[in-house]
Each structure stands twice: as structure tokens, then as C-alpha cells.
Image (spheres, rainbow, N blue to C red):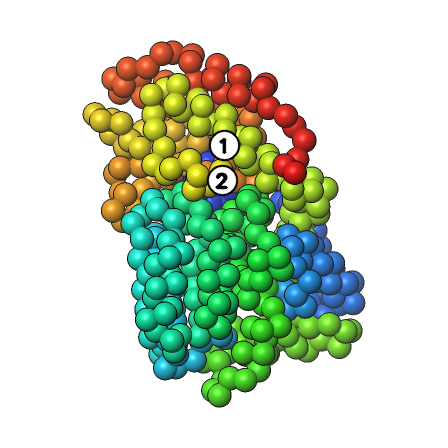
Amino acid sequence: MPKSFHPPQRTLLGPGPSDVSPRVLEAMARPTIGHLDPLFVAMMDELKGMLQYAFRTQNALTLPVSAPGSAGMETAFVNLVEAGDQVIVCQNGVFGGRMKENVERCGAIPIMVEDAWGQPVNPNRLEDTLKAHPGVRTVAFVQAETSTGVESDSRTLVEVAHRHDCLAIVDAVTALAGTPVEVDKWGIDAVYAGSQKCLSCTPGLSPVSFNAAAVERIRKRTHKVQSWFLDLNLIMGYWGTGTKRTYHHTAPINALYGLHEALVMLQEEGIENAWARHQRNYEALRDGLEAMGLTLLVEPAHRLPQLNAVRVPEGVNEAAVRDALLNDYSIEIGAGLGPLAGKIWRIGLMGQASNPRNVCILLSALENILSAQGHSLDRGAAISAARAALVGMATEPFG
Ligand SMILES: *Cc1c(COP(=O)(O)O)cnc(C)c1O
């Protein structure tokens, strides 16, 4: 007879999921109640308010889709794009490729703006492409490309899209709560995120937000959204305002308790403080890695503090290092994807996992493993550099 499954305690320093706080896990173990129970509905309203806080928006259409980040992506595309539309997709890594797939599956025509993996989306190239294709109505890009550790300039890209009367769809799955995502200030029309990256909740939920222009686009659709489950017109019957909620699907009750708790923790810390914490721990990690003779893939100006792409040094076996981290230290980091496979490691410092202790544990484990593999390094230098960075840092939030 199969026995209960008891996973080990890992330290999750990969591209997601990130470490989940015991507070979130405890919240998820509370009693399941009905999805139309008035107490549950009140919890949903509070959850919505906290998502508006995280997205920095007043958008009424802000809610968690009952499925992972990929479903948030699909929600944005199936609701805003119609068959025959031309959509510009900016691609500089894995997730732009998935956006292209979504556009095609909506029966629309993707027009690609491509940048090298490891580079941010180039706003000038976007502008030129918009000028060359005056029929385009939608622009989509990834703010935080988890496959490469690059941040693109959302504010500028949205501005360019709006200059050409396009709606902007922004992937903020890895960005949200790790680095600023200013939905209202930047005028982002549609945005989606994930519960398991910098929000440090369990995987399986995708917070989304749509502004008035996006809602107007949905209202004026000439054909029904082809996905019944992700049709926002129907979902709003359940997540909309007021006390009268209609059944759409059974909400993932306990998962939503978890997200609620993760968002309570974000509010307690203050989102600006969370951004500052991600930045500080990145700086400590960077100094430690550099002291070990390692280099980061991305130019300093475009680096994500929550996802660090580290070049695998000459003569080191990339996969063997990850295996040793997992088996001997119970630490998970990520591998490179696509053209970067075998060339980089992806070290995440996301959400709860972004803390000085994890920086030091990882550096020390990596030092042992790399030196056993014959990579010459100055023992102890990495921890000293990281400690020096942490001690020298101001702790107040970024202004
Ligand atoms: C993780 C991720 C996704 C997909 O999220 P899932 O929860 O795995 O479906 C989409 N976009 C980006 C940038 C991501 O990092």
C-alpha cells in the first residue's frame, strides 16, 4: 500500500517555486468552507484589495485566476485578442515564445520583435515595428524574463505601445513583489503574475489585473472568448463586486487562504521594503559570486535581483554542480534553457527565499562544490564579500 508522501525540506533558489512560509502552509491547512459562504466571499474581497496593493492599481478587474501563471497569460490573450488581429510580441527568452503560441492559438497574427537572450527588449525596435504595422492593436512583452534574468523597461515599452494606440499586455509573473510593477502609474492595460515566485505562495494561482481600456476591448469583442473557463465575462459573475455571486467553478478555497496569507505578509513588510530586500540580497550574492571568480550573464543595468543568471566557468560540469547542491545541501537552483542550456545557472532569490541566510548558505555550498571540481578559488572570500555587502547596507526602503 502506498504511504503518505513526505517531501524533504529544500531551500528553493531556482526560477520558482520559491520557499513558502510556514504561515502560508498553516493557512492552507485551515478548514475548507463553501465557495459561496459569506465568510469566504468577504475573504475574497480582502484578497482582491491586497492584489490591488501588490499591483499598485485601482483596477476593479483584479483577481486570482484559479490556475498557474501560464493560465494568467492565456487569460490576457484569449480575452483581448480576436481572430485576425495583429499582435506584436517582444521576445528575448522562453516566455515571449509562449506568448507567440497564445497569439497563434487565438487565430491572430504574431509580429515578432526579437532580442538576444540576455538582452532587454529594445524599445526603438518596438517603435519601428509599430510604425511598419499600423494595423496592430496589441503589444505584449515580459517584464522579468525568468529564463535569462533580464528586466525590460516596462514603463517605456507601455508608453511606446500607447503612442500607437495599442493595448499593452505585460507578463509580471517573476516581477511582481520582487521589483516595481506600477500598473496604474505606467498605464499597463493587462498584467498577470504567479503565486509561487516573489509572492512566495504555493504554485497554482495567477493574479491578473485589467484596466478600463482592456475591459472596453473585451466588451466590444465580436466573437465569444474561445475558452469558457478563462472568459472574464463569466469569471466576473463570481469575482465581481456585491454580495450576489454566481457559481462559475469551485474556487480553490484552501489555495486562496494561502495567497491571502502571503499577501498579508507582503502588506506587513510593505512592498517597497520587499523590493529593497530583493535588491540588497542580490547585491550580497553578486559580490560573493564575483569573489569566487564567477560572472553574471546580464549587464548590471538590466539585472533582475530575484533571478541571477551565472555563467558556468570553463571546465566545470554544470549539471553535476546542481545535482550536488540538491543531493548534498538540499538546495535547488535552475539550469539554463534554450541557447543558454549548459552555459548558465539560474539562482533565484525570490520572496521569502531572498534573505541573507540563503545567500550565505548557497555561497558556501557552491564554494565547496566548485573547488571539489577543480575550479580555483580563494576559500572564504565569497562569504566575506557577501557579509561585507550586507553589513555596509542601509536597511531603509528605496526612496
Ligand atoms: C514562471 C513563469 C510563467 C509561468 O508560470 P507558471 O505558474 O509556471 O504557469 C510565465 N512567465 C514567466 C516570466 C515566468 O517566470
Q: Is residue 348 above or below residue 213?
A: above
User: Which residue is more in the foreground, 331 or 173?
Assistant: 173
User: Which residue is more in the foreground, 30 or 147?
Assistant: 147
Residue 274 seen in render: yes
Mark 1 falls on what kind of element?
A: helix
Q: Are marks 1 and 2 in contact (CB under 8 Å)?
A: yes
Query: Which residue is at 57% across, 82% downward?
Result: 219
User: Residue 58 placed where, x, y %?
Assistant: 69, 62
Residue 252 seen in render: no
The quarter holding residue 255 reads bottom right
Query: Which residue is at 34% across, 59% downward?
Result: 125
User: Residue 309 placed where, x, y %?
Assistant: 37, 37
| Residue reaching furthest to the bottom | 222
Q: Is residue 48 above or below residue 379?
A: below
| Residue reaching furthest to the left | 315
Mark 2 falls on what kind of element?
A: loop
Query: Which residue is at 50% across, 61% downward?
Result: 159
The quarter holding residue 59 reads bottom right
Q: Amino acid at mark 1?
A: Tyr
Name the residue beneath numbered marker 1: 282
Query: Which residue is at 29% across, 49% downward?
Result: 116
Quadrant the C terminus occupies: top right
Name the residue beneath numbered marker 2: 306
Q: Amino acid at mark 2?
A: Gln
Q: For the residues marked 1 and 2, what is the alpha-carbon distance in whole angstroms? A: 7 Å
User: Residue 254 placed where, x, y %?
Assistant: 64, 56
| Residue reaching furthest to the top | 379
Q: Which mark is residue 101?
A: none
Q: Is mark 2 within 8 Å of ligand 1?
A: no
Lateral position of residue 76 relative to residue 341, left or right:
right
Lateral position of residue 338 relative to residue 82, left or right:
left
Q: Earlier in the sequence, mark 1 or mark 2?
A: 1
